Image: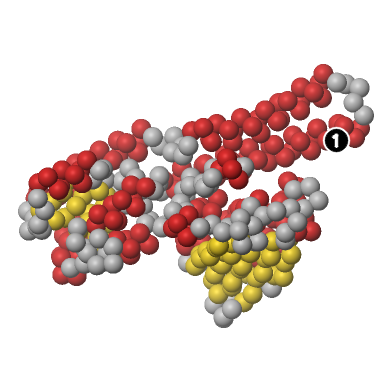
Amino acid sequence: MNKRKILLVDDDANLRETMLELLTHHNYEVKTASNGQKALQTLNDWFPDLIISDMMMPVMDGHAFHELVKENVLLSSIPFVFLTAKLEEDQMRKYLNQGADDYVPKPFNIKYLIEIIESRIERFEKIKNANRNIYLGDKKHFSHEINTPLNGILGSIDLLIDNKGLDQEDVFKFYEAIKISGARLHKTMQNVMHFQNLKSDTLVFDTTSTTAILDDFLIVKTKIADGYENQEKRIIYEIDKANLKICEKYLQFILFELIDNALKFSPDNRNVMVSGTINSNDFYELVIKDFGIGFSENELNKIGATQQFNRDEKEQQGLGLGLFLSRIIVKKFQGVFSISSKEKEGTTIKIELPIST
């Protein structure tokens, strides 16, 4: 049985060390952070069963950290327990009303702390089991992403059946429409499955695999061209050959999602630039740059699972999972993922992945 996971956030190094030993002794897997900002970095690719956080901390205090956790769809259901030395009862009631699950006063009783942890994690397990197969994003968008391509497939098939006198060119167009709709539906379900497996901690990463970046890029480029009529020439690339320490399936997933997004959020007359270079003996740098709508600074700070911005205005397709999952996958393979963007000027994504020697 997998150990239950706890994220402990406190700026007191001695207390962190003491609690780490205590919780490890009680068979919990524990990670620690000295403030809310560092804790959020940990939560980028590690999902605990419980968060314990001090209130008063430098850089980002417990209250600000808790607010950001509750805004994140993937993290919002994780039990959150405050550690507090001095807090009036009415203040604590306010935080409980805002979504905190409990609080433990300092100095704390060890037995009481363990009881709180066990009860909150047990309740969280029941919630996870009840919702294990439920997508947590916007249900309206989810239904749209299923029904739209499905209707495209079924509608095209009906027209082919009902109009047997269609010429070959029209038949070919319907076949193409079915293929594009099927690919969109497959992509949607693939991302939802990855997301669900990530939530349940069953997504498998084979860190011993290697794959050739140029070969994978060319495969992905061909797949993307199938969904963008006469748009393949927009992808301008210069990719150095190298074998990277990541499995083929996930590298192709990352390339497809990021290049597809770059094309989707750019005008049809603007190119997408893809470059790959060996920047050291150990790492390969992949850069994907577009000149599209870009993100505001506030939007960049909120990028996460199922997060989309101005969907109706920008006519987005998809569920907002691709960018989030790509970032997680890169980190799982010991890589670095960064994104910079400016509204109406475009977005640049940089990925560094280890090279297989």
| Residue at left offset 61%, top offset 55% | 293
Asked if residue 12 can be seen in this view, the reply is yes
Nearer-the-camera pick, 349 or 29: 349
Asked if residue 333 can be seen in this view, the reply is no
Nearer-the-camera pick, 244 or 316: 316
Question: Residue 267, position in %: x, y?
Answer: 70, 53
| Residue at left offset 19%, top offset 58% | 55
Q: Is residue 35 left or right of residue 85?
A: right
> Of helix, strand and loop, which one carries label 1?
helix
Q: Is residue 159 left or right of residue 199?
A: right
Question: Residue 232, position in %: x, y?
Answer: 77, 55
Please name the residue that numbered disc 1 is placed on: 172
Question: Residue 40, position in %: x, y?
Answer: 35, 59
| Residue at left offset 57%, top offset 80% | 280
Structure colour scheme: secondary structure
Q: Is residue 324 left or right of residue 154?
A: left
Q: Quadrant of residue 287?
A: bottom right
Q: Is residue 96 above or below residue 340?
A: above
| Residue at left offset 22%, top offset 64% | 57
Q: Is residue 208 left or right of residue 265?
A: left
